[in-house]
Image (cartoon, rainbow, N blue to C red):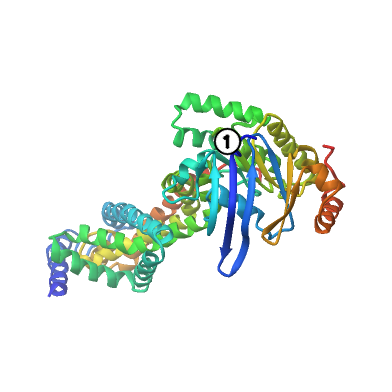
Amino acid sequence: MPEPILSIRKLTKRYGDNVIFHDLDLDVNEGDTIVIIGPSGTGKSTLLRCINLLTRSDSGQIWFSGKEITAKGTNEDRVRQQIGMVFQNFLLFNHLSALENVKLGLIKVKHFNKAAAEAKAMEELDRVGLADWAGHYPGQLSGGQQQRVAIARALAMDPRIMLFDEPTSALDPELIGEVLEVMRSLSLDGMTMMVVTHEMGFAREVADRIVFMEKGSIVEEGSPNEMFNRPKFERTREFLWKITELYGKKDHGEE
Amino acid sequence: MAFLKLYFCGQKYCLLVLPVIRQELKGENLDFLTLLKYIAEGTAYTLGVTVIALPSGLLIGTLLAFLYVYGGKGIGKVMNVYSTVMRGIPPLVLLFLLYFVVSKGINLSGFWAGSISLGIVSSAYQMEIIRGALLSVGNDQLMAARAVGLSRKQAIVNIVLPQALRLAIPPWSNEAAIIIKDSSLVYALGVPEILRRAQLIGASTQQPLLAYLSAALIYFVLVTVTNRLLNMLEKKLTVPSNH
């Protein structure tokens, strides 16, 4: 068994008296796609934000490629450069074109020269099928296209792991498929991914492991087969049934 | 004492200039164009005061706005006090107060003292404009930039600032118009700008209505042209969008 690329140990996050999650343990192996599901308000998004240090956890440790990134004196910027993040509401830089969005990190963080950054950025846009839209601004793109640019922007930094925080929740139903398609092919290419989503079709087909979180704890985790067909807990079965009823029926044709 | 000095500076100027005008134009009924031409010669001063006050106010205001928004609670409170005080006092009163302070330290002409003072007054308003713009760009953009790996400083400079400055153009063009008009206040320090010249020639030719109408016309043209230019700038910088 290889060492996991990401290990979370006894991670706890509170806002005041409000415990978001507590004593969370989770391992992610290189190349795996982990799908995190659970009712809203159970700390899934906060967990992702803690992993790339956008939010500070209160106690516990996160180990990322052999280093404890929750340790004091960690260079946060250096850590984030290796962790790609995709947000629910895209968060493209509104004043920059698709190409400039992808290029920015390469120039400012990785110190690519202009030509190299441009070439790399075009490559990434091509990967998400948007090479023809490079000169368009976020306001000129559909939600699905914006999210694909956001994925390209994260990929351009050559991250070791990609975090997706409900990447399709803000999209019109007919635009969800194109984003899931990009994510599926990323997963097939061997990218390590952690995905918070309600898309059960995606979870069932792409996930190596599904993690069910509720009220700040991991209730159960297992392969899609285990989780969907013979969950250990009644609560897991109940949630999966409900969410499949809600989202799974319009499966955007990816089943 | 300084106020007396100030007053006398103004008086001395009057005494020096008025006789000159009187000799040239005394009692004559001037036509509108001659009046206008005479008053318009003050435009250089009006523009000069504006060109000094507006950018220096922008520079100070922007710096203070950054401190206000990103400097933590303590600094934010200090900025809030600065803003409240500066905006709670009539600009003319502040002009005299600042002129008093500034001219104690360094020997400045009324023009420079007035311009700098007006810039400081304006900095409080411009701070609020930039602060509002920074806040409406929002923390999400900052977070997205940091997620890419940019440092906080890089994220603010490359992502937040360019968007905030675009948002700030419409309220800023309002402030620009106010400063052009408020530049007339430096007449109280004896600077021969538009209003001052209108007053002088109006008194000496006994055509105050025509004189002040001329001044009004010049101010109106200056403000309108400035607003037009800033509108064009705003259009030019607008990020293309379908929505």
**Quadrant in the picture for residue A164:** top right
- Give above or below for B128 relative to A230: below
Q: Do we see residue A74 in this rendering? A: yes
Q: Quadrant of the N terminus of chain B?
A: bottom left
**Quadrant in the picture for residue A27:** top right
- Give above or below for B234 relative to B42: above
- How many marks can you see? 1
Q: x and y percent of residue B62 in the render? A: 38, 55
- Residue at the spot 48% in from the left edge and 51% down from the top edge: B164
Q: Determine which residue is flagged by label 1.
A: A160
Q: Do we see residue B149 in this rendering? A: no
- Give above or below for A117 relative to B109: above
Q: x and y percent of residue B42 in the render? A: 26, 55
Q: Residue furthest front?
A: A1
- Residue at the spot 53% in from the left edge and 58% down from the top edge: A59
- Badge 1 sits on which subunit? A
- Residue at the spot 79% in from the left edge and 43% down from the top edge: A224
Q: Nearer the viewer, residue B36 or A254?
A: A254
Q: Is residue B107 left or right of residue A251?
A: left
Q: Nearer the viewer, residue A189 or B27?
A: A189
Q: Is residue A77 left or right of residue A245?
A: left
Q: x and y percent of residue B178 in the render? A: 39, 61
Amino acid at the residue labelled 1: Arg
Mark 1 crowdedness (10 Å alpha carbons): few <14, some 14-19, many ≥20? some
Q: Nearer the viewer, residue B100 or A175?
A: A175
Q: x and y percent of residue B34 in the render? A: 29, 54
Q: Secondary structure at mark 1?
A: loop
